[in-house]
Amino acid sequence: MTTDAVGGVWTYATGLASALAAMEVEVHLVTMGPPPQGEKRGMLSDRRVRLIESRLALEWQDPAGDDFCNARIFLEDLEDAIEPDIVHLNSFREASFDWLAPIVVVAHSCCNSWGVACNDTAWLSEPRWQYYTRAVSSGLNRATAWVSPSQALHDVICDLYRPGSPGAVIWNGVSPAASSAKQKRRFILAAGRMWDSAKNLTTLARASNELDWPVFVAGPTPNSAAKDFRELTLIGDLSHNALLDRMQHAAIFVSPALYEPFGLSVLEAASAGCALVLSDIPTFREFWSQAALFVDPKDDRALHDALGRLCRDDSERARLQLAARERSQHYSLNRTADAYRTLYRRLQALHPRSIPAQAREVHV
């Protein structure tokens, strides 16, 4: 299984790998991009999962494919050494390599869908990003099966790339939070990269003006961000455990995102018993309909009013906290792992390894 350690894919991959290992699946987790450091490395506590660091470029950081040949040699040699039954790729372009085992590609996100959602697509016409688009399309078509974590993203991927196979939807999942949430405090929590326009935190900053409760935002913060987000309390890039602890205490979790293929942080906040205030986008409607307040992500006044009402209305806030917590139980990590294991077994039966590793074509 490939992964990166930059964003939410690391949370997804470490959780899934550990859950699969508990089901007696041997997992080799291969990092792409910068290796995990400190607390992130501690998120993979299951010693049954073997961690392999490649330092290969992430595809969205290498749109022109300059590292493509290095990745091909490294990963094909690794497959020869491990001889896996299934190759699970959490990115697209590597699916076009000459794999011997069946390939599962998981479409966590892509630059084209990000650009469309953020109304920022001019740069996608550049030659390097056109190459990226072709590589994503090729990866989807070469995969034995591809998966999306939401129906909303599945439909977008189909519209953008027209893959040759229909794909499947397997929801992400998390381990349940503590049996009961800690004492809730009178503050609002959000999480996201301040520089990522998809997180839409500038709208949250405007909406936070003159709210009765403080709004804390966890995430990487560039030095230039302070003046743009002065209505928010920026608490920096917390460790995963520290963020989960904040969620346990937060009364409200808000995400005004323009683009969210799944929303693991929202699921974690719901599991911790936060009332949810979310942007009215298809992904959030898919998972949280009737268990959250929905607001037009481009309307900061509407967001301000929704947060203000929820701060003042104790009974409605309590109702939404319970609704979010109960809904979160539908998206368990064990259910996710079981769905992947079922997919792996089906692919292994239909597409067994048919070529011995030593017969692979040599690349020079």
Image: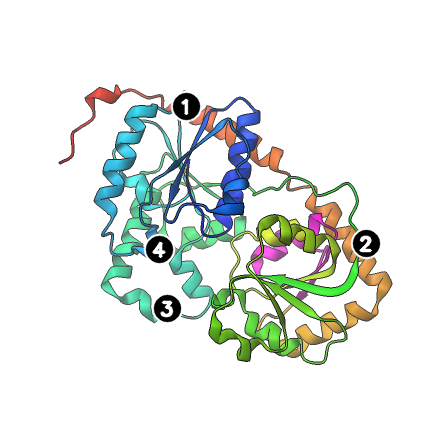
Front residue of this view, candidates 24 and 354 = 24
Mark 3 and mark 4: Cα distance apart in space: 15 Å
Give, as a three-letter code, the residue at label 2. Answer: Gln
Identify the image quadrant of residue 166.
Answer: top left
The magenta stretch is 270-294
Mark nearer the N terminus (3 vs 4): 4
Mark nearer the N terminus (2 vs 1): 2
Q: Is residue 267 visible?
A: no
- Image disc number at residue 183: 2
Give the crowd class for mark 3: few <14, some 14-19, many >=20 residues within 10 Å: some
Q: Is residue 233 left or right of residue 63?
A: right
Mark nearer the N terminus (4 vs 2): 4
Mark 4 and mark 1: Cα distance apart in space: 30 Å
Q: Disc 4 vs disc 1: Cβ atoms closer than 8 Å?
A: no
Mark 4 and mark 2: Cα distance apart in space: 41 Å
Which x, y percent locates residue 121? Answer: 37, 68
Front residue of this view, candidates 226 and 7 = 226
Q: Nearer the viewer, mark 4 or mark 2?
A: 2
Residue at numbered disc 3: 121
- Image disc number at residue 348: 1
- In this picture the colour scheme is rainbow
Q: Vertical placement of 69 versus 195: above or below?
A: above
Determine whether the residue tagged by mark 2 lies in a helix, strand or loop: loop
Determine whether the residue tagged by mark 4 lies in a helix, strand or loop: helix
- Image disc number at residue 60: 4
Give, as a three-letter code, the residue at label 3. Answer: Thr
Q: Nearer the viewer, mark 3 or mark 2?
A: 2
Which x, y percent locates residue 131? Answer: 25, 56
Q: Nearer the viewer, mark 2 or mark 1?
A: 2
